[in-house]
Amino acid sequence: MTEFYSNGKLLLTGEYAILDGANGLAIPTKFGQYLSVKNATTGQINWQSLTDKNIPWFTVDLSLKDFSLLATSDVQFAERLISILRETKALNPSFLDACNGVYVDTKLTFPKDWGLGSSSTLINNISQWAQVDPYKLLEATFGGSGYDIACAQNDTPIVYHKIGGNPKVEKVNFDPVFKNRLFFIYLNKKQNSRDAIKAYRQLNIDKNELITQINGLTTQLIAAKDLGKFETVINRHEHLLSKTLKVETIKNQLFPDYQGCIKSLGAWGGDFILATGTMDDMQYFRQKGYDTILPYSSMVL
């Protein structure tokens, strides 16, 4: 049996603008996804996907010859997987040529609705298995900036951006001394990144100016030596994106009376937010029904 693993991701700065080349501060998470492959003689790909509780949430049997669908628990997801495997084969025509069948198990180490990268970790794992470029496979399937692939492959915080369509990854020293005052809170719904990207693409804005401002904020956030400076930067970032997207900040929408600062992470409106405060302050969110709250050190690799 061969096993692969990829880290999950969170984007602290640069959401949306990272699609156009802005610098984004991204952090790999302690959560991720495994993919294991075992040879078989079935002439098929027998695929099973497990939740973090080891419960199968998706199964599919595919023809090894042409990836045609034989049986599945979820046709829509099966079609997505078939598309990924066909794009993988296009990138490496010899992929799976030498075997007579495979059993494939994937296993998330986080609930799949958390939005920590169930798709990007899958793409990176398949790329390792097939020995193809994960950025090219991502571009051919889900699209996006590729920062999530960079997180899948790195074990430290990174600054990510694309230059002429090519990914550039810089490892950075980002380990705030005030991290005990930083918390990640799940908004109880998964955001569709593809829809968010499509909406952003349709905006008529000066993207060069946006990139310049985001780059400055990313640099300032990394350099922040105390919580006050950190909060100033994330507030500026929130207001800049709010003005750009013409969408109220998540704090104004849901938590206007919270005393600390709040920042959206990734596509606005779902998944996780970052909140500053104390452990006692987190009771504010619990009282509103947001019970999934992770301290910074419990989330960040």
Image (tube, rainbow, N blue to C red):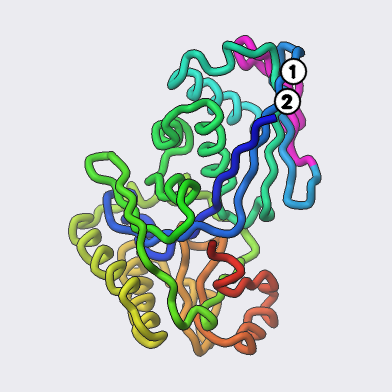
Image position of 217 (left or right of 206): right
Please check the rendered image and state whether residue 242 is part of the magenta-colored stretch, yes or no. Answer: no
- Say above or below: 110 vs 35: below
Q: Quadrant of residue 208?
A: bottom left
Residue 13 occupies quadrant: bottom left
Count of marks placed on residues: 2
Q: Which residue is mark 2?
A: 103
Circle 1: is it few (<14), some (14-19), or many (20+) Cα within 10 Å?
some
Whether residue 99 sits left or right of residue 141 in the image: it is right
Q: From the image, give the main secondary structure of the stretch colored magenta.
A: strand
Q: Is residue 69 magenta?
A: yes
Identify the residue at image location x=45%, y=31%: 137
From this viewpoint, is residue 75 visible?
no
Would residue 242 appear left or right of 112 to someone viewing this image?
left
The answer to the question of whether label 2 and label 1 lie on touching residues, with beta carbons closer than 8 A, is yes
The amino acid sitting under disc 2 is Tyr
- Cα distance, mark 2 to mark 1? 6 Å
**In the rendered image, which quarter contains the N terminus?**
top right
Residue extending farthest to the right is: 55
Residue for badge 1: 40
Quick check: 61 above or below 112? above
- Residue 99 is situated, as x and y percent measured from the top left of the image, at 64, 13
Residue 40 image point, x, y percent: 74, 18
As drawn, 163 above or below 251: above
Give the residue displayed 23% in from the left and 55% down from the top: 207
Question: Which residue is at 39% across, 32% downward?
Answer: 136
Which quadrant of the view contains residue 76?
A: top right
Magenta residues, start to end: 56-75
User: Viewed as shown, does residue 281 lie left or right of 56?
Assistant: left
Q: Position of residue 131 (x, y in %)?
A: 48, 27
Q: Nearer the viewer, residue 5 or 49?
A: 5
Q: Which amino acid, by three-letter code, is at mark 1?
A: Ala
